[in-house]
Image: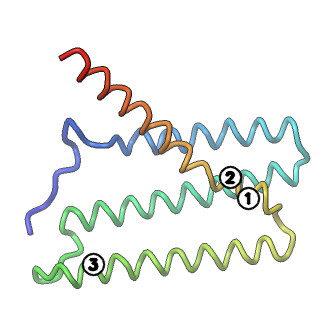
Amino acid sequence: MKPIILEGKDEFPLHRVELFNWVISGVLTLIVALKFPFFIAKSVFVGCLVANISFLFLKKDLVDFLQGKLLLSGKVDKAKRIFYLKYYIRLTIIAVVLYVLVSRHIIHPLGLLVGLSVVVLSIGITLASVVKKFYLNTKEE
């Protein structure tokens, strides 16, 4: 299996998603800290942090998988199994951590959900800009 190049002209800009993740996290945490109690702001911050760290690990694993770094003696099935195993282990760890934080009232569940939505927001914003750019380029031709 030959490696897939991830820096093409028509690629989805993951670096922009990463940047938006951190910018939106900071702005959202600041806005919530100014308008709501510290407990809610802390919950939003924790949610943003968990979502961003999870996104970074998922991105690293996906890039490794797509570039063939997980291939063991050319077997794609084994590489898929390793990728999915890492994914579900990470998901389980996140679920346990979030369960403990919410069940012991360390963070507020709604603040956590707002924080966890940061990655979805940044992907949506990036996707909208890519679609807009694509639409404008095809309209000119």
Judge from the rendering whether residue 139 lies leftward or rightward of residue 121; answer left or right: left
Q: Which mark is residue 5?
A: none
Residue at label 3?
80
**Residue 71 sits above or below residue 28 on the image:** below
Q: Residue at x 39, y 82 (%)?
A: 85
Q: Residue at x 14, y 82 (%)?
A: 75
Tell whether label 1 touches label 3 (CB within 8 Å).
no
Q: Residue at x 55, y 54 (%)?
A: 52
Q: Earlier in the sequence, mark 3 or mark 2?
A: 3
Mark 3: few/some/many CA within 10 Å (<14, 14-19, 20+):
some
The residue type indicated by label 3 comes to: Lys
**Residue 39 sits above or below residue 61 on the image:** above
Q: Residue at x 47, y 45 (%)?
A: 123
Tell whether label 1 touches label 2 (CB within 8 Å).
yes
Residue at label 1?
112
**Along the line of sight, the residue nearer the viewer: 17 or 132:** 132
Q: CA distance from mark 3 to mark 1?
A: 31 Å
Q: Quadrant of the C terminus?
A: top left
Residue 29 in percent (x, y) is at: 73, 42
Q: Earlier in the sequence, mark 3 or mark 1?
A: 3
As helix, strand or loop, the secondary structure at mark 1 comes to helix
Q: CA distance from mark 3 to mark 2?
A: 30 Å
Residue 28 in percent (x, y) is at: 70, 40
Judge from the rendering whether residue 80 lies leftward or rightward of residue 94; answer left or right: left
**Residue 84's image quarter?**
bottom left
As helix, strand or loop, the secondary structure at mark 3 comes to helix
Mark 2: few/some/many CA within 10 Å (<14, 14-19, 20+):
many
Q: Quadrant of the N terminus?
A: bottom left
Q: Which mark is residue 115?
A: 2
The residue type indicated by label 2 comes to: Gly
Q: CA distance from mark 2 to mark 1?
A: 5 Å
Residue 126 in percent (x, y) is at: 44, 37
